[in-house]
Structure formats: C-alpha cells, structure tokens
Amino acid sequence: MSDRETISFDISAEMALTLREAVESGDYQSRDDVLRDALQDWQLRRQQFGLTDTKSAELWDRGIASGPPGNTDGAFAGTHAEHDAGFKRKYVRRWRRLLRVKSDL
C-alpha cells in the first residue's frame, strides 16, 4: 500500500503563478515539491508553537484587549534567534534535497 495520496484542489491565479515561478526559478524541481515544503513548514510551525486557528484568534484578542504596546527594546531577541534557526533548517533541507536530485542525474 502506498504512503502517498493524490489530492486535487483549486487555488487562485496568483498562487498558481507563485508555484510556477518557484519551479521555473530552479528553487524546486516540481510544483509538488513547493506544496510539500509549504505543508512541512506549516506543520513545523504548528508543532513548535502549538498554534491552531482558534488559538491564534484567542491570542490576537488577548493582545488587542491588553491595550497599546509598551517599551519593546530587546523583547524580540529570542524570537529572531528562533526564526533564524528555522530559516537555516529550511534552506539546509532544501539544499540537501537539491544536491540529492543532482547526484541522481
């Protein structure tokens, strides 16, 4: 039994253009790869931060209700480090995949 499933869905013309450009630029081998990578990123964000649409909406409402922001100097230092680490993992994974594809040629 295969561990893959074919799914068909509609996307906007703008999203379709983005898919084509990602493949034509050489960043990805196929549209499937673009979508697979996007879904993996989405899953990772949900796992790392435990965010669902309901939780995101709840956090947004709490933030609005808390009033105007205060002094945020240095408040995002840890967030930037986490983002940089996630960004690096994503592109290392992408380069490894590209190298694997090229070595198979």
Image (cartoon, rainbow, N blue to C red):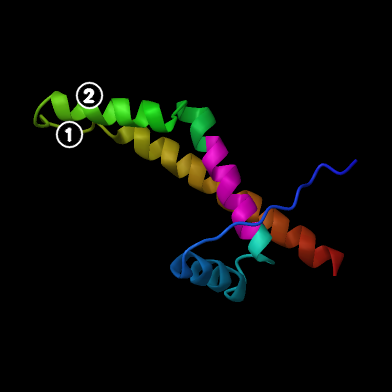
Number of residues whose C-alpha sits closer than 10 Å to that of mark 2, classed few (under 14), some (14–19) or many (20 or more):
few
- Of the two numbered discs 2 and 1 in the rendering, the one whose residue sits closer to the viewer: 2
- Please report the residue visible at 55 percent of the width from the left and 60 percent of the height from the top: 10
Q: Check disc 2 and give the amino acid type.
A: Arg
The answer to whether 18 appears left or right of 72 in the picture is right
Residue behind mark 2 = 62
Residue, far right: 1
Q: Nearer the viewer, residue 5 or 59?
A: 5
Query: How far across and down, in percent of the image, does residue 95 sit?
Result: 65, 57
Q: Nearer the viewer, residue 51 or 5?
A: 5
Magenta region = 33-44
Q: Nearer the viewer, residue 9 or 104?
A: 9
Query: How far across and down, in percent of the image, does residue 33 sit?
Result: 66, 58
Mark 2 to mark 1 CA distance (whole Å): 21 Å
Residue behind mark 1 = 73
Looking at the rendered image, the quarter that the C terminus falls into is bottom right
Q: Check disc 1 and give the amino acid type.
A: Asp
Earlier-in-chain disc, 2 versus 1: 2
Asked if 103 appears above or below 56 in the picture, the reply is below
- Tell whether position 43 is magenta: yes
Looking at the rendered image, the quarter that the N terminus falls into is top right
Number of residues whose C-alpha sits closer than 10 Å to that of mark 1, classed few (under 14), some (14–19) or many (20 or more):
few
